[in-house]
Amino acid sequence: MDELLKKQLMVTACKVRMGIIEGVYNAKSGHPGGSLSIADVLTYIYFHKMHIDPKNPKMADRDRLVLSKGHTAPALYSVLAQRGFFDAEELKTLRKIGSRLQGHPDMKHIPGVDMTTGSLGQGISAACGMALSGKLSDDSYKVYTILGDGEIEEGQVWEAAMFAAHYKLDNLVAVVDNNGLQIDGKITDVMSPMPITDKFAAFGWHVITMDAHDFDSIEAAFNEAEKVSGQPTVIVQKSIKGKGVSFMENQVGWHGSAPNKEQYEQAMGELEAALKALEG
Amino acid sequence: MADMVKKATRESYGEALAELSSEFTDLIVLDADLAAATKTGIFKKACPERFIDCGIAEANMMGVAAGIASTGKKVFASSFAMFAAGRAFEIVRNSIGYPHLNVKIGATHAGISVGEDGATHQCNEDIALMRSIPGMTIINPADDVEAKAAVRAALEFEGPVYMRFGRLAVPVFNDKDTYKFELGKGVTLREGSDIAIIATGLMVNEALNAADTLKAEGINARVINIHTIKPIDRDIIIKAAKETGMIVTAEEHSIIGGLGSAVADVVTEEYPVPVHKIGVNDVFGHSGPAVDLLKEFGLSADNIVATVKKALGK
């Protein structure tokens, strides 16, 4: 990847992370861990891949993204704000009464949100519907969906996986965020969905793996996905839950809890330092 | 009474979809491996390129329907009521109801008249489940003519609709040349002021037969057909309560949460009168011929007559 582009994406991803912390801290609740683990891939998709227009969020031929792991809404909201769908200041209203920024994504009220999600396993089905609809009318838009590695324990995910392969939805790219942790502990201890890659391959998907926090790896994965024809693609990204905030990294406790004032200041301090280093 | 032509409303559903396929060119029909039974197979024959079989996976089908609707196309998702409303409830609630997407759910094989398949497939709870979802419209047509008109009305309406169809062939009492379907409007089929029988689905014809019997015995029963259970026609119910002072409801559904409950909700708020509910009395069904089951479970003109007389102390 072009070094300048890479740097720009890293800067943006850092700002997205700051928006996540800002939102969750002000809400005094929410899911920072899994939001931070998808900050890079969301930044890449929204800033480098998607055909979208923040001024026309319902544009008919836009690419679509369904956040199937809807509890990581803070990451989606933050990237949408960075992309210009709404003011980043609004992130501070997350989860508050009267806010558009519901605890889980609400397509009816938040510009840029393509599907209402939050109940795990459902978003991928809606993404399949969007992709199928595009195929039926020869539209050229692409559909992305982001799943959690715990989420794929839901049976509906595999109904959808069968469907996408059966209907050869090569306009669909699913990303499985493999951070290895779910609420009750390690995914391999709670209810192992492993091996994730083999499962999707057996269901007829083209399978790619990538490093979730390396834009060269992300670029390579999405470039490969673009060349796939006749089958859906899944990108299993090896990620770090809580990535970018030292004390949150790989800590299951940060799945669904908000930082206190001291922790907030430390997290923002770390991200500001990272940003400063990037911007030189 | 002359023998009326009989037809299952699931047939009407499949035929209506096929007939409307050329007018609604963006209509997609989904099914979950039951096209032969739900009769969406008729649409499939007419329009194979817009028929999508989702396999035996109702949860995913409802999500796929939501995704299609989000792109602006019209979509019907079909299965048996048990799986459409029951198994897939939470997907209907969260992926269709909450974002208020324009998905039509065509649920066939509702109620006890499924017959021989028995309790696992006799869904007497679907209206209750769907009523609890904010913004869900529920239509339960009474015969072929009404069912076909309702399918068109649902397609012309923007928003989620749950449509309930039956397996059993039932008398076609509406006149297709004069019938007009109005979403959300009850239909007074017989005037009367001694009591009001408010019925839905296949119980409407039973109510008409009951009214004839009652009339011969000097009791003038009003008969109201409620095809749209949500939003319900409050005015026609309040008027009936005021003018008759006594209501009997009749539905092929549990007495919990269905038409009877909806009617009772209205009258208790607006003009309390006794409401006697005829329906499946909080029990599971069992295998047997549909017509025998309907009699056994009291879903008959005879039971309506008996209930009316008891209610009036006669």
Image: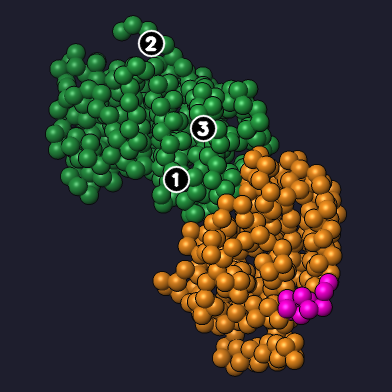
Chain colours: A orange, B green
Q: Is residue A196 magenta?
A: no
| Residue at point 44%, 25% (across, down) | B148
Looking at the rendered image, the quarter that the C terminus of chain B falls into is: top left
Q: Which badge, 2 or 3, comes first in the chain's sequence?
A: 2
Whether residue A196 is visible here, answered yes or no, is no
- Label 3 environment density (alpha carbons within 10 Å; few <14, some 14–19, many ≥20): some
Question: Of the residues shown, which amino acid type is indicated by label 1?
Answer: Gly
Per the picture, the main secondary structure of the magenta-coloured stretch is: helix
The local secondary structure at tag 1 comes to loop
Question: Of the residues shown, which amino acid type is indicated by label 2?
Answer: Met
Front position in the image: A264 or B57: A264
Task: Give the Cα distance between marks 1 and 2.
Answer: 35 Å
- Label 1 environment density (alpha carbons within 10 Å; few <14, some 14–19, many ≥20): some
What chain does mark 3 sit on? Answer: B
Task: Give the Cα distance between marks 3 and 1.
Answer: 16 Å
Residue B78: x and y in percent read 56, 35
Residue topped by disc 1? B159
Residue topped by disc 2? B4
Residue A199: x and y in percent read 82, 53
- Label 2 environment density (alpha carbons within 10 Å; few <14, some 14–19, many ≥20): few
Task: Give the Cα distance between marks 2 and 3.
Answer: 31 Å
Residue A141: x and y in percent read 67, 51
Labels 1 and 2 positioned on one and the same chain: yes
The local secondary structure at tag 2 comes to loop
What chain does mark 2 sit on? Answer: B
Question: Which segment is the magenta one?
Answer: A1-10
Relative vertical location of residue A44 with respect to residue B139 in this rendering, above or below = below
Residue topped by disc 3? B24
What chain does mark 1 sit on? Answer: B
**Residue A2 image-quadrant placement:** bottom right
Q: Is residue B43 left or right of residue B300?
A: right
